[in-house]
Image (cartoon, rainbow, N blue to C red):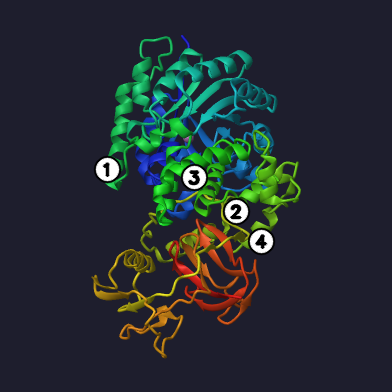
Amino acid sequence: MSRIRITDTSLRDGHQSLWATRMATSDMIPVLEQLDDIGYHSLEVWGGATFDVCIRYLNEDPWERLREIRRNITKTKLQMLVRGQSLVGYAHYPDDIAIKFIEKAAENGIDIFRIFDALNDLRNLETCMRTVKEIGKHAQACVVYTISPVHSVQHFVDTALRLRDMGADSICVKDMAGLLAPYTSYELIRALKENLDVPIQLHTHYIGGLAIATLLKAAEAGVDIIDTASVPMAFGSSQPPVETIVRALQDTEWDTGLSLHDLFDIAEHFEQIRKHKGFERGVTRITDMKVFEHQVPGGMITNFYSQLEQQKAAHRIEEVMQEIPKVRADLGYAPLVTPTSQLIGNQAVFNVLLGERYKMVPGEIKDYVRGFYGKPPAPINEEVRRKIIGDTPVIDVRPADLLEPIWEKSKEACKEWAESEEDIITYALFPQVALKFFEWRKTKRAEDVPQIESNDEVRTTAVESKAPVAAPPRMKPPVKPRAVNRGDEDMNIDEIRELMLLLDQSNIADLELQKNDFRIHLRKHTATDTPPASNPFPGAPKVKPAETAEVILDENITEVLAPMVGTFYAAPSPDSAPFVKIGDHVEPGQTLCILEAMKLMNEIKTDFAGTIVDILAENTQPVEYGQTLFLIQKD
Ligand code: CO
């Protein structure tokens, strides 16, 4: 008998994949004893997004959650997911924090540390793995699975061998996008089993529906451990259900030996939680399935679709889907997983929307190209590298070697709040969020106020932006003279544009419309028209609603449009003077404003010389895609 052992992911990946990681500790406690009795190989209960979500949205101490689980789980091993040098965050942390984090996680109850790096750059696993080994816990190292010209079975085997040499107690094939097909799974697991003497575990996601067959073929190939979730948290973008796998392997040489009856009792508990909290079931949409076509994980597609929708460019989703694999190839075939999936995806969106590849490049992509995330699996396209960072040197050391220790500084910074070393770690990982949480915790204790409603906003995993980056403005050709009679100054500029277009293309001269509560009157400009003397050109938005002043745009006036939906900042910081004011003369390349779009700060610059005639966006206010930001009279 070569029984397959199972890791249950319900308390980590299961609800992270389907319920935005929103299961609370109190939802888990009643079922912990039953989970402990099942006979699972291990329970994945911590790490990944759970840490961040606990303090950010659930007002829970993640360390207390771990201790609570450990108190109730006495027989089964507890497992966590570590994002290499990024631990449970989104950027690399210095070694002193990584070491403290691993030590404290072990002290509070973790037995098995599953460690991965988004780029399979093994240097990013070194500190965590060494620490896990030193404290005598189980170091499980990941081979992150992806498909590309450089990711052959041999490449994965070589990676696994190096990980074993680094001291890995077991190897996990981590297929976060559900790309691993059944027969490849057989070939890959077979090759790993033939070359390694440590246990091999397979972690995959259901998404396109391959996962059950993929796990069965892995069983045939000799896999030791597989990951599943309780059925209310299975299917869709999560793991396959444990119940199906247990049944499929019953009475075979790989029989799991787990009791279906007991598993259903646990499933009933989670189903009640799901219904009570309005959480979703795992489903597979066509867009999710398209991962087969362009390897872009479903979660990412949904994310980009909503970003494009905000940019009024949802119809360009297919172009973005075609662009993602190209950017990925340019940037050395990084697997698409946090944070590389966001980096590559955002760059693809910029490339499509700006109409020129790498014209606008976020600071994070520059960091990536400079080597601050590690070494990509294949070399970065030379031409693209030059376009992105020019002659700036690329680092060749382990990125964390460049990071100063921050433990002492963090300790000092949160000494008023921290009650334990765990608190200091929480602060070092997420300073702002941690302080808010500590403050909340203190208030709650002092006043015994009821728990604040948790924020429903889904945490996006984009790395927070640091430096503003250059963004070329979209220039529209000079506007032909035309007259607009406005009944209301709040008319959406896009609607006015559309109506103007309609008017231009028609043979009517006048258009009067009742729209919602207000009236708009558009009139074709003719040679006989003369602008009224009092015309407050070009202050269209400042016209009083009662008047119907004409707005005449001069041939030499060029509009600078918002290249994306975002927030308009007139100045580099709240205390500083605005970049430009009305009447200023500007030179080509001069910064006009900052537009914050898709969580990135972008400098908007002018392509030509001229005089600022008007500024049509309000500081710190949202602007629409294509909205006029500035009117500039060209020299
Ligand atoms: Co996963």
Circles 2 and 4 in contact, beta carbons < 8 Å = no
Mark 2 and mark 1 lie on one chain; the one further toward the N terminus is 1
Which of the image's four quarters has the C terminus?
bottom right
Residue 94 placed where, x, y %? 68, 48
Amino acid type, residue under disc 4 in the picture:
Glu
Q: CA distance from mark 2 to mark 3?
A: 32 Å
Residue visible at 69% across and 28% down in the picture: 166
Task: Name the residue located 53 percent from the left edge and 50 percent from the top edge.
Answer: 462
For disc 4, the marked residue is 412
**Amino acid under disc 1:** Lys
Amino acid type, label 3: Ala
Q: Which residue is mark 3?
A: 49
Q: In 3D space, how far apart are the residues under numbered discs 1 and 4 (Cα atoms)?
A: 44 Å
Q: Nearer the viewer, mark 1 or mark 4?
A: 1
Dot 3: element: loop
Question: Of tags 2 and 1, which is closer to the observer?
Answer: 2
